[in-house]
Each structure stands twice: as structure tokens, then as C-alpha cells.
Amino acid sequence: MIVLAVDTSGRHGSAALCRGDATRFEVLGLTSLEGGRYSARLIPAIRDLLHNAGVSKSQVDGLVVVDGPGSFTGLRVGLSTVKALCEILEKPLATVSMLEALAITYGIDGEHVSAVLDAGRGEVYVCEYRVSGGNADLVQQSIEKLEVFLKQAQSITWRILTTYPKLGEALVGVTVQDPLPADAIARIGLHKLLAGDTGDPATLDANYIRRSDAELFSLPKH
């Protein structure tokens, strides 16, 4: 199965073209994407990945996209692009949360973990997962003020996984990892596609965890 994966959730995104099945996984191409220019760079990057690997659009068997959390604009660009490709090519779509990806990639089978990402504005995204059989089952998710989470973390007895170095500086025992590139997302997405864990492009929306400024400012004032 040939899989195209896209991540435009953060300041620095990426796209990857990979091939694999239940036992094998091969990266055919990986390219970085400059944050703030996703709308201009994503389609050319996908075109170049396919061209360099000698793969046609019709040979792509499935698509994978990071559906959140992260930049509102970035997520919309990635989701709209991948949804359009799925509809045009009539290919299945798998979504992966970046927090879920952290738990699956760095968690241990049978482990309960908290995955944490920098949400900006002095806040963090927090998700608790139970890791099992290459999956991460969501227990709960929230967005917290950093200072509040740091206090809460003192009583957490399971492992905390993050790409946010500030947490590693502030807390003992936090596992700080490098941000995951799109090929790592493709590996998780391939597992979902093979299992039939797919979404409907027509109804798919991003998991922002919090509302956008536009939505917040439009709320009625009492």
C-alpha cells in the first residue's frame, strides 16, 4: 500500500510518501514544509514527492492527515487539501492526532501516558491515553494553562511524553522527544488504513481542542 501523509498542524510541517503493509514500511520521500506558507507549498510538495518516487496519483492507495491540535489556519489547509484529494482520487482517509502519534510512537504497550504539546499563549494541550497493540485509546483531553498543568503534573503517576522542552526543564521524569515528521504519521496512518479505521472526507473536521479567536470573539456578551 502506498500512503501519502501530510502534517500542517504546527510551525514546521512535512509531507511523506511511504509504502508498506502489516510487516514492512518504507519511506519513498519526505519533505519539510515551511509554516505560514502551507497554502502555497503543500500542493507543489505533494507533486514533487510523487514525481521523485515515480508514483502517479492513481497509485496512491490511501491518505493520512494530522487533524490536530495546532494552528487553525495550518490544519484547515492540510485537511482541505487531503479531503479534496480523497474525493477526486476516491481513496480512503485516515486521521492522526499529533498527541495520539506521540503516545503510539514513544509509548510502551500496556502503558498509560499523558501526551503534552505547546499550545501557545502560555497553555498546553494534554491528552491521556492507554497504549495497546499499536493503538492509543483516548482517556481524556483538555487544554490547560501551563502553570496549572505543572501543578497537576506533580500528582501524575504515569509517564508524560512531550516535544515541549520547557516541560522537561520544569518537571522531573518527563520524556522530551523530537517532533514527529510526516513519515512517522504515515506509519500510524498505514496501520489505521489496513484496519479499516478511516474517516469520511465530507464530514471530517479538525480537532482543535479549543475554539479559534474568531469563534471566541463572536460569542454573545452577557
Image (cartoon, rainbow, N blue to C red):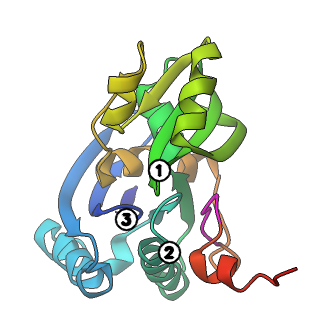
x%, y% of residue 137? 68, 35
Query: Can you identify the residue that label 2 sits on?
Result: 79
Measure the C-alpha gap from mark 2 to mark 1.
26 Å
Visible residue check, residue 178: yes
Query: Can you identify the residue that label 1 sits on?
Result: 122
Dividing the picture into quadrants, the one containing residue 213 is: bottom right
Task: Name the residue rendered at 54%, 80% in the picture.
Answer: 90
Query: Can you identify the residue that label 3 sits on?
Result: 6
Task: Name the residue rendered at 32%, 85% in the picture.
Answer: 39
Q: Nearer the viewer, mark 2 or mark 1?
A: 1
Q: Amino acid at mark 2?
A: Leu
Crowd band around label 2 with a 10 angstrom C-alpha radius: few (<14), some (14–19), many (20+): many
Decide: is 61 above or below 51: above
Q: Earlier in the sequence, mark 2 or mark 3?
A: 3
Crowd band around label 3 with a 10 angstrom C-alpha radius: few (<14), some (14–19), many (20+): many
Task: Name the residue rendered at 53%, 53% in the picture.
Answer: 96
Q: Amino acid at mark 3?
A: Val
Q: Quadrant of the N terminus?
A: bottom left
Q: Amino acid at mark 1?
A: Gly
Horizontal placement of 212 versus 178: left or right? right
Q: Which residues are magenta?
A: 205-210
Q: Quadrant of the C terminus?
A: bottom right
Q: Main secondary structure of the magenta part?
A: loop
Element marked by disc 1: loop
Element marked by disc 2: helix
Horizontal placement of 49 versus 157: left or right? left
Horizontal placement of 20 versus 44: left or right? right
Near-viewer residue (72 or 109): 72
